[in-house]
Image (spheres, coloured by chain):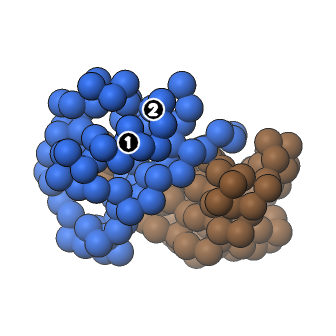
Chain colours: A brown, B blue
Amino acid sequence: MPEFMDVHHNMVGITAEQLKEAHDADLAIQGEEQVNFKQAWADPDSGVVYCLSEAPSADAIKRIHERAGHPADEVHPVPLVV
Amino acid sequence: MPEFMDVHHNMVGITAEQLKEAHDADLAIQGEEQVNFKQAWADPDSGVVYCLSEAPSADAIKRIHERAGHPADEVHPVPLVV
């Protein structure tokens, strides 16, 4: 399954609890699109959040994030990993 | 040790071999700044590369990437991980 990194901007001030709630909202419905959100990293000061996932397509990730209430600003396939 | 995500733009067309060479160049000198580059993901189509690391500071990461020949365009502390 291809890997993707998606990015959210404008999450300034996000807390650990809010990151977990957002991640849990993704996990609750990700199976409907065969998406597997593996990890997420947040910088509350700049408001950027990075999510690493495996998914059949970028559109599947976009749909899950939108339905969970936090649409992604960027979704990049990352076929190269080291 | 704090975690960071740094981002390189303008790496369009990067190959698996080039990503590995760049990563190896970082690994060869990272110890001089107590940086630990853990993983990197690349999207050759959009030219974006994400690097996850542990480091004492963003400046330490910037110095290693600069000396290795590929300065980072963004370096974000990511104190929140889920």
Q: Nearer the viewer, residue A31 or B6?
A: B6
- Image point (81%, 47%), residue name: A15
| B33 to the left or right of A71 | left
Residue B64 placement: quadrant: top left
**What residue type is disc 2 on?**
Ala
Mark 2 and mark 1 residues within 8 Å of each other at the beta carbon: yes
How crowded pointer 2 is (Cα within 10 Å; few <14, some 14-19, many 20+) is rated as many
Chain at numbered mark 2: B
Residue B45 placement: quadrant: bottom left
In the rendered image, is residue A79 in sight?
Answer: no
- Image point (81%, 65%), residue name: A68
**Residue beneath disc 1:** B61
Query: Where, quadrant-wise, is the C terminus of chain B in this rendering?
Result: top right
Residue A30 x, y percent position in the rendering: 71, 57
Q: Nearer the viewer, residue A46 or A8?
A: A46
Query: Which comes sooner in the sequence, label 2 or label 1?
Result: 2
Chain at numbered mark 1: B
Q: Which mark is residue B55?
A: 2
| B37 to the left or right of A26 | left
- Image point (62%, 74%), residue name: A73
In the rendered image, is residue A19 in sight?
Answer: yes
Residue A60, above or below B58: below
Whole-angstrom CA distance, mark 2 to mark 1, is 7 Å
